[in-house]
Image (tube, rainbow, N blue to C red):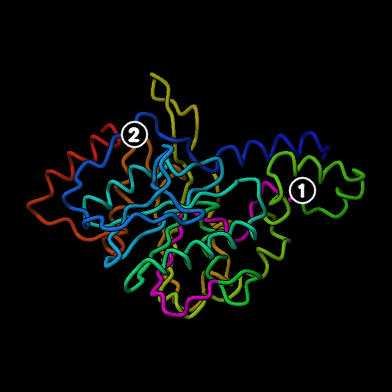
């Protein structure tokens, strides 16, 4: 396989890792359901879940908080709608922002520091970290023992949630780990892989230490909800005749299921038949399946019966249908 072909294949798979930010995101739809924001805090790496200029978090220190982590080619604004869903149920959020071309170890270290810093502003720190796609890899690695830049606060009550994360490595990047190809190309293969995905180019392969040695979760993490998406036969976009012109298949079940992660203690594996983007939603696609899982597993609070109609109205407003 030539380096050019390797680059094209990688660009194709990595270009689909996450949706682009949804335009014209609305403001908080139901602020009365949120805890009263009592404190403005600035934490490196964390910001409100939008693409605006404001970076200060407005939080209630007495309440738990969720941290959302986007995947590759994403942004904090990608999770604006999900933050709205949490807000409707009285739950506050922040989004982790990172450079998609950095090493995943660097990004996970930055995240561990952000969690540590945020915890200092909470009366009784209870934090749920939710990562989608590559964001799931970063989120879990930030919360492992013996990390180069570990989370240090031993008093945090943590929950980890990962969605559609390729814990076994990205299959389309296998050529980046091929010794024969790396030698035969005189380094051009490595360059092509770096041009596509940046400093994380080798970490996302099945052969990397990042994948092969996922590590054990720190004791502060009381549970890991691992949502695996069966993306076979899914479609993201159809033409006027109903034919699929863009599928929603990014990672296989084998890429998402890795025994050292799936069988780890405190980990619950939940499989959902859903596309890679469908599961977290975008304009025109409401993430009903993810909301159902989150409410069943206690990540999102149950919607009171008297609020069901208002919630459906909010979902229509957020996702378009």
Residue 125 is situated, as x and y percent measured from the top left of the image, at 36, 71
Closer to the camera, 249 or 304? 304
Figure check: 159 above or below 170: below
Q: Residues within 10 Å of mark 1 (few under 14, many from 20)?
A: many
Q: Residues within 10 Å of mark 2 (few under 14, many from 20)?
A: some
Residue 6 is situated, as x and y percent measured from the top left of the image, at 76, 39
Instruction: Tally the marks.
Output: 2
Residue 165 is situated, as x and y percent measured from the top left of the image, at 52, 56
Numbered tag placed on residue 276 in the rendering:
none
**Residue at 68 percent of width and 43 percent of height:** 197
Numbered tag placed on residue 175 in the rendering:
1
**Callouts 2 and 1 close, C-beta under 8 Å:** no
**Residue at 16 percent of width and 49 percent of height:** 32
Numbered tag placed on residue 25 in the rendering:
2
Res 188 → quadrant: top right
Figure check: 239 above or below 261: above
Quarter of the image that includes the N terminus: top right
Q: Magenta residues, as a range?
A: 151-175
Residue depth check, mark 2 versus mark 1: number of the one nearer the observer: 2
Q: Is residue 74 left or right of residue 169?
A: left
Instruction: Identify the secondary structure beneath mark 2.
Output: loop
**Residue at 50 percent of width and 61 percent of height:** 114
Residue 128 is situated, as x and y percent measured from the top left of the image, at 38, 64
Q: Is residue 231 left or right of residue 205?
A: left
Figure check: 60 above or below 19: below
Residue 43 highlighted magenta (yes or no): no
Quarter of the image that includes the C terminus: top left
């Amino acid at each position: 396989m030539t380096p050019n072909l390797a680059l094209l294949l990688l660009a194709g798979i990595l270009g689909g890792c996450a949706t682009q930010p949804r335009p014209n995101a609305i403001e908080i739809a139901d602020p009365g359901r949120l805890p009263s924001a009592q404190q403005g805090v600035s934490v490196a790496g964390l910001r409100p879940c939008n693409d605006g200029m404001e970076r200060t978090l407005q939080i209630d220190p007495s309440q738990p908080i969720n941290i959302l982590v986007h995947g590759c080619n994403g942004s904090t604004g990608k999770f604006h709608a999900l933050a709205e869903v949490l807000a409707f149920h009285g739950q506050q959020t922040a989004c982790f922002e990172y450079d998609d071309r950095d090493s995943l170890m660097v990004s996970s270290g930055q995240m561990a520091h952000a969690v540590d810093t945020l915890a200092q502003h909470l009366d009784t720190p209870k934090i749920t970290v939710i990562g989608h796609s590559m964001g799931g890899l970063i989120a879990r690695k930030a919360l492992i023992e013996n990390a180069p830049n570990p989370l240090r606060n031993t008093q945090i009550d943590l929950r980890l949630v990962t969605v559609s994360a390729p814990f076994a490595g990205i299959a389309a990047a296998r050529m980046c780990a091929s010794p024969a190809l790396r030698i035969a190309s005189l380094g051009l293969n490595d360059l092509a892989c770096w041009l596509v995905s940046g400093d994380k180019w080798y970490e996302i392969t099945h052969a990397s230490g990042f994948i092969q040695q996922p590590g054990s979760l720190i004791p502060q993490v009381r549970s890991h909800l691992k949502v695996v998406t069966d993306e076979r036969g899914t479609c993201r976009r159809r033409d006027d005749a109903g034919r699929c012109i863009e599928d929603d298949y990014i990672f296989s079940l084998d890429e998402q299921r890795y025994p050292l992660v799936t069988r780890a203690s405190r980990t619950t594996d939940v499989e959902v038949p859903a596309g890679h983007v469908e599961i977290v939603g975008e304009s025109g696609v409401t993430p009903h399946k993810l909301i159902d899982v989150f409410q069943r597993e206690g990540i999102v609070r149950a919607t009171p019966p008297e609020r069901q109609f208002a919630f459906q109205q909010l979902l229509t407003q957020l996702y378009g249908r």
